[in-house]
Image: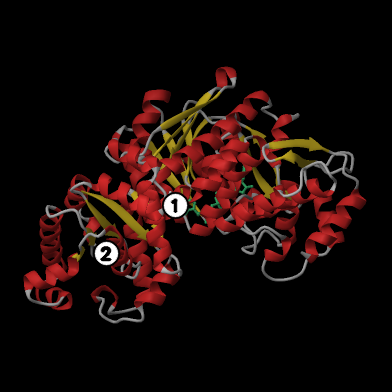
Amino acid sequence: MTESEDIEIVKKRLGRRSIVLVGLMGCGKSSVGKRLAFKLGLPFVDADDEIERAAAKSINEIFADHGEALFRDGERKVIARLLRNGPQVLATGGGAYMHAETRQSVRENGIAIWLRAELPVLMRRVMKRDTRPLLREGNPEATMQKLIEARYPVYAEADMTVESRDEPHDIIVAEILNRLAAPSTAQARTSQGAAPSRSVSVELGDRSYDVLIASGLLRDAGALIKARLGAVKCGVVTDENVARHHLATLEESLKAEGLFAGSIVMKPGEATKSFRDLATLSERLLELGLERGDLVVPFGGGVIGDLAGFAAGILRRGIRFVQIPTSLLAQVDSSVGGKTGINTPQGKNLIGVFHQPSLVIADTAVLATLPPRQMRAGYAEVAKYGLLGDAQFFAWLEANWQGVFGNNGPALTKAIETSVAAKAAIVARDETETGERALLNLGHTFGHALEAWTGYSDRLLHGEGVAIGMCMAFRLSENIGICPRGRADRVVKHLKAVGLPTKIGDIPGGRANAGELLKLMGQDKKVRGGKATFILVRDIGQAFVTREVVPETVKAFLGREIAL
Ligand SMILES: NC(=O)c1ccc[n+]([C@@H]2O[C@H](COP(=O)([O-])OP(=O)(O)OC[C@H]3O[C@@H](n4cnc5c(N)ncnc54)[C@H](O)[C@@H]3O)[C@@H](O)[C@H]2O)c1
C-alpha cells in the first residue's frame, strides 16, 4: 500500500477520534506529532502549550507556584477538553497518561500511541534542553530511570507502542501510519482496544496444561490459579528486575484470592542458575510452609523459570508449579515443555529434571518493561519456530515484525501463540527429546559454543547466539548443497532488520578460533558418541536432525565463518 492510501484509511478510521501521543520527555512526541499531523492534514496540539496558555504561566512557574498536584489536575481537565475537539494529533506531557481518568478519556476519544525510548536516547535528547522541572535537581539520569520504572508499565496500556530510536522521525511517522492502516489495528480497536486473548493446550495426557496468553493477565493471576488449581498456597520466586516492576501486582492478585504464601527475590542473571542458589531457594520455599498440594510460582525470565521449576521438581519429591514468564524468550520457549535445571562449571543445563508446569500465564503487557536487547534476543526464538517448521509463519514475521515489537498488540499475541503452539505440538509428540524435540535446537549447537566462548557474558545473550547459530545452520546447509542458495541471505536480512547479530564477527571483543569453537561444540550435551548433533535445513521451514556432519567439514566451515 502507498503512503497516501495509508493516510486515507487512517483518516477514515479515526473519524472524530484523535491520535494521542504518550511517553516520557525526550521521546519525540512534539516532533513526531507535528510531522504526523502534517501528513494527515490534522491540527497538531501540544497539551503543555494549552496548559500554559490557560494558566498564563509557564509549566515551570505552575510547578513552582502551585506544586505538582495542582498542575496534574489542570492537565487532566485541559486534556479532557482538547479530546472533545478531535480529530487532531495531541501530544501529552509525560505524566498525563498516568492519570486513570485521562487514560479513560483517551480510550473513549482517541488512539493512544506510546513512543517508547531507552534511557540513553532520552538523556541525549533531554540534556540538550534545561526546561524540564522534574530533572532540575539531583542526578538527572537516576531521576529519568525512576520515571521509566514507574511509568512504562502504565504507558504499556496504550493501543500501540512504537520504538523511538535515534533515527529520522519521518521513519517513525511512516511506521505509525503503516500500522494504523493495517487491518489488525482495526480489529484491535473494534474490540475496545483489548488485545486478543489466546489459550494453547500442551497435550500430555493427565499432565496436560494450558498456556494462557493475553495482555493484563497478571492482575487476574490469583483468580485464574484458584479456578483451575484450587485454593492452594503460592510461593512466588522472582528476580530483582521483575520484582521492581511487577511483583506488587502479582502479590495483590494472589492475596485477593487468599493464595499468597510469600515471595522470594533472587539476583537477576544466568549465575543464579547454580547449586548454591538452588539450595537457598529450596530452603526458603520450605520455610514458606509449602506442602505437597501447594504451588511454586516462577515469575521471571528463563533463569527464574528453570531454577524455580527445578526447585519445584525436587521439593517434597515434586510439587506443582505455575509458570508466569516475563521475558519474550520465556513466554515463547522456556516456560513451556517442562525442561528445568541449573548450570555447573561443566556446562549449561547439565543438572535438571523434566517437570511439567500445571499452568502457564503469559501476560504480554509485562514485556513493556523488558529491555529491547532482551526483547530482540527472545525474538530469535520466535523466528526459530518459523525457520524450523513453518515457512508461512516466517513470511508473516518478515511482514509484521514491527508490530510484534510494538507490544500489547495483536501481532505480539499472534507471534507468541504461534510459537507456543509449535513448541506444544513438538513436546506432545516427544516430551523427553528422544527424537523430534531436538529440532527446537535449531541454531543451538553453534549458539551454545559461542555462548561458552564468550564466557556466558553480556557480550552475547542466549537468543543472540541462537540468531547467529541459525544463520550458520542455513549457510552450512547451503554449503553442503542440501538447501537452495539464497535462503541464508533471506534469514540474515530479516534478523538484521530486527537488530540481531547474524555472524560471529558481530560479537564484540576478541576474535574466535575455529579449533576452539569446535572443541566447545564437542562439550555440548547434545553430543553422542563424540558426534555433535546438528539441526540443518532443506529450506525455510524444513529443518531436520543429523549427526552425520564430519568434524573436518565443520572446522573448515567455522574457519570461513570467522572470516566473514
Ligand atoms: N527450559 C527451557 O526449555 C529453556 C529454553 C530456552 C532457554 N532456557 C534458559 O532460559 C534462560 C534465558 O532466559 P531469559 O532470556 O528470559 O533470561 P533471564 O531470565 O536472565 O531474563 C533476562 C533479563 O531480563 C530481565 N527481565 C525479565 N523479564 C523482565 C521484565 N518483564 N521487565 C524487565 N526486566 C525483565 C531479567 O531480570 C534479566 O535481567 C537461560 O538460562 C536458558 O538456558 C530454558
Against 312, is 230 above or below?
above
Q: Position of residue 312 (x, y in %)?
A: 56, 35
Q: Identify the mark nearer the N-term, 2 or 1.
A: 2
- Which residue is at the front of the view, 300 or 30? 30
Any part of residue 175 in sight: yes
CA–CA distance between discs 2 and 1?
23 Å
Judged left or right of residue 115, residue 267 is: right
- Is the residue marked by circle 2 packed among few (<14), some (14-19), or many (20+) residues within 10 Å? some
Element under label 1?
helix
- Which residue is at the front of the view, 522 or 412? 412
Callout 1 amino acid: Val
Circles 2 and 1: CB atoms closer than 8 Å: no
Element under label 2?
loop
Write down the residue under mark 2. 94
- Is the residue marked by circle 1 packed among few (<14), some (14-19), or many (20+) residues within 10 Å? many
Judged left or right of residue 349, residue 2 is: left
Callout 2 amino acid: Gly
Q: Quadrant of residue 194?
A: top left
**Which mark is in front, 2 or 1?**
2
Write down the residue under mark 1. 242
The residue located at (64%, 50%) in the rendering is 274
Q: Quadrant of residue 484?
A: top right
- Which residue is at the front of the view, 32 or 307? 32
Q: Quadrant of residue 114?
A: bottom left
Q: Position of residue 471 (x, y in %)?
A: 70, 52
Q: Position of residue 451 (x, y in %)?
A: 70, 56
Any part of residue 283 in sight: no
Q: Position of residue 379 (x, y in %)?
A: 56, 49
Against 215, is 449 above or below?
below
The residue located at (31%, 61%) in the rendering is 39
Is the residue at mark 1 in contact range of ligand 1, meaning its CB lies under 8 Å from it?
Answer: yes
Count all numbered tags in the image, as a single digit: 2
